[in-house]
Image: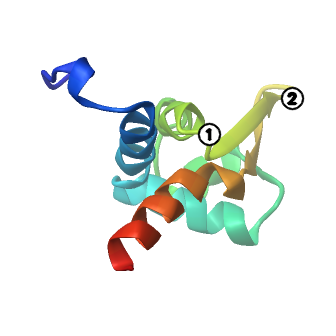
Amino acid sequence: MRAFKPNNYTLEDFEVTVIGEAICHPARKRMIQLLKTNKNLTNTRLSKVLNLSKPAITKHLLKLSEANIVSYKYNVHEFKIKLNPEGFNKMEQFICEIKS
């Protein structure tokens, strides 16, 4: 974890940073793309498609979940994963501010 002075940043700064850190990994970027086009993906299926172990998929899901980008529910030996597009809203607002 990086050192920072929390009093120098707003809650929005932290929220945007959490989203940025969640989407900056190539495997997580690919997971998001797959979830956008496949509504009923599981960790087992993602593991096969991305050629990653289930523990690695779980690690990436936790990071995406912390950023409110995905949600998942346990269902008989695997997780059903759902994309939450609203999780990108803070990042989208931030990018729009920069672009304007």
- The residue positioned 12% from the left and 21% from the top of the image is 3
What is the crowding at mark 1: few (fewer than 14 residues within 10 Å), some, or many (at least 20)?
Answer: some
Report the front residue among 14 and 2: 14
The x and y percentages for residue 20 are 38, 50
In the rendered image, which residue does mark 1 sit on? 68
Q: Using the image, determine if residue 34 lies above or below residue 77.
A: below
In the rendered image, which residue does mark 2 sit on? 75
Report the front residue among 56 and 14: 14
Real-space CA distance between mark 1 and mark 2, rounded to the nearest whole angstrom? 20 Å
Number of numbered markers: 2
Q: Please, which residue is most extreme toward the bottom here?
A: 100
Report the front residue among 94 and 86: 94
Q: Based on the displayed image, in which of its 4 quarters is residue 9 positioned?
A: top left
The x and y percentages for residue 18 are 41, 38
Q: Using the image, determine if residue 100 lies above or below residue 73.
A: below
Q: Using the image, determine if residue 17 lies above or below residue 41.
A: above
The x and y percentages for residue 59 are 47, 31
Query: Which comes before the other along the chain, label 1 or label 2?
Result: 1
Q: Which three-letter amino acid code belongs to the residue tagged 1?
A: Asn
Is residue 40 found left or right of 52 in the rendered image?
Answer: right
- The residue positioned 60% from the left and 56% from the top of the image is 89
Question: Residues at badges 1 and 2 in contact (C-beta under 8 Å)?
Answer: no
Quarter of the image where the C terminus is located: bottom left
Is residue 83 found left or right of 5 in the rendered image?
Answer: right
Secondary element under disc 1, as helix, strand or loop, is loop
